[in-house]
Image: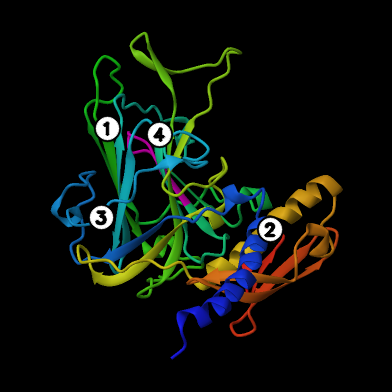
């Protein structure tokens, strides 16, 4: 038997050898910490009881489905205060639809827009963002106000990558409803809030047609946002507050999984939605962030550094060294640091960065933000 005294020098040497690698990894992300907080996660269970889409999120079908954590400011609670009003959501699924329910605390429920595909976030609204492929491309956005007015769109790429927007996409077959707990557009009283409910067909959010039904354990990226304007009550109406210069004050953006920056169109920052075939209401398994997602952190770090480098130098860096990045990086997973190779090919206006541990297939990221193999 080896005594503890004889083991201590070995343990200390091991810890001392690991510590610099952890410290070095942390130093690499210095200045970008707000973009690498762990996204939130939700495990959605299968249901055989389809909810009646009427805005009632307390009906029997939803009773045992857990709520998300309350929303935070889009930049995160370490940067901005917690929202003054509570917001939360819940999800479940069946072979035909993804179901989403949302609950917004609100003492003054108001909404003006009534026509589909008007810019609904000019009112207070609730928004859903879905990236089924976890590639940051080909994702969907659905917005709703307290009048049940929908603004839905498809984005081949995020705005930052100049991908354009398909405003003509209209979530075919989607059902939606809202319910106001109080009154609508009556400044003279005090409301309790409003709820929204959705049944989103898989066929509506399957790119290229057909129907992609999530496999048991499959992970998508999703986030929810609530736009909330500061208003005054004037002349029997709600009027957006203005600053000292006469401009309308910026809206509040409250989200489920903080983005770290005021920009919802960074799908890599969205939360994780994992699907399980167990019945809704049963105990959900604990979510574990996949190893590949920790690898991707280094790809996104390179991406952000390249974009900053280009902004200053009008070109992309040609080597990792120009970005202050090593070719060997430690990916921490389940308490261990796993050595990975980081490599990059680049021209003045394009780049492709890849990461591999030598055992699993490599993962890559290009200058237009597309994740691939």
Residue topped by disc 3: 66
Q: Nearer the viewer, mark 2 or mark 3?
A: 2
Q: Does the CB distance between marks 2 and 4 fall below 8 Å?
A: no
Q: Distance between the Cα atoms at labels 4 and 1?
A: 15 Å
The location of residue 251, given as percent across then percent down, is 49, 29
The numbered mark, 2 or 3, whose residue comes first in the sequence reads 2
> Which residue is at 44% across, 51% downward?
223
Q: Distance between the Cα atoms at labels 2 and 4?
A: 31 Å
Task: Tell me which segment is drawn in magenta.
Answer: 141-150
Residue topped by disc 1: 193
Q: Does the CB distance between marks 4 and 1 fall below 8 Å?
A: no
Above or below — where is 310 with respect to 132?
above
Residue 149 lies in the magenta-colored region: yes
Q: Outermost residue toward the top?
A: 235
Q: Does the CB distance between marks 2 and 3 fall below 8 Å?
A: no
The numbered mark, 2 or 4, whose residue comes first in the sequence reads 2
Q: Outermost residue toward the bottom?
A: 1
Q: Nearer the viewer, mark 2 or mark 1?
A: 2
Residue topped by disc 4: 83
Q: Nearer the viewer, mark 3 or mark 1?
A: 3
Visible in this render: residue 169? yes
Q: Residues within 10 Å of mark 4 (few under 14, many from 20)?
A: some
The location of residue 341, given as percent across then percent down, is 70, 75
The numbered mark, 4 or 1, whose residue comes first in the sequence reads 4
Q: Does the CB distance between marks 3 and 1 fall below 8 Å?
A: no
Say left or right for 36 vs 347.
left
């Amino acid at each position: 038997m080896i005594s503890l005294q004889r083991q201590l020098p070995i343990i200390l040497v091991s810890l001392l050898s690991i510590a610099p690698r952890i410290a070095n990894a942390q130093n690499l992300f210095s200045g970008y910490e707000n973009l690498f907080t762990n996204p939130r996660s939700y495990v959605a269970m299968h249901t055989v009881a389809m909810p009646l889409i009427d805005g009632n999120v307390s009906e029997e079908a939803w009773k045992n489905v857990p709520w998300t954590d309350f929303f935070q400011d889009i930049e995160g609670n370490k940067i901005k205060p917690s929202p003054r009003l509570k917001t939360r959501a819940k999800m479940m699924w069946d072979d035909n639809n993804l179901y989403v329910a949302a609950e917004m605390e609100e003492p003054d429920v108001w909404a003006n827009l009534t026509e589909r595909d008007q810019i609904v976030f000019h009112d207070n609204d609730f928004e859903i963002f879905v990236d089924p492929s976890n590639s940051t491309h080909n994702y969907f956005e659905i917005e709703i106000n307290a009048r049940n007015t929908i603004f839905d769109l498809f984005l081949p790429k995020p705005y930052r990558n100049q991908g354009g927007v398909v405003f003509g996409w209209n979530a075919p077959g989607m059902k939606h409803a809202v319910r106001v707990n109080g009154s609508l557009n009556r400044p003279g009283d005090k409301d309790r809030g409003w709820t929204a409910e959705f049944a989103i067909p898989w066929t509506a959010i399957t790119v290229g047609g057909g129907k992609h039904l999530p496999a048991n354990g499959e992970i998508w990226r999703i986030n929810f946002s609530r736009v909330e304007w500061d208003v005054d009550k004037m002349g029997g109406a709600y009027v957006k507050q203005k600053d000292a210069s006469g401009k309308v004050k910026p809206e509040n953006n409250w989200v489920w999984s903080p983005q770290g920056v005021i920009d919802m169109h960074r799908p890599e920052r969205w939360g994780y939605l994992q699907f399980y075939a167990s019945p809704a209401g049963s105990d959900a398994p604990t979510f574990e962030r996949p190893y590949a997602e920790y690898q991707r952190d280094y790809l996104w770090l390179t991406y952000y550094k390249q974009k900053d480098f280009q902004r200053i130098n009008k070109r992309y860096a040609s080597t990792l060294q120009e970005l202050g990045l090593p070719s060997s990086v430690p990916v921490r997973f389940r308490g261990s640091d796993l050595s990975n190779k980081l490599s990059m090919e680049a021209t003045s206006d394009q780049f492709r960065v890849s990461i591999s541990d030598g055992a699993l297939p490599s993962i890559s990221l290009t200058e237009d933000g597309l994740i691939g193999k």
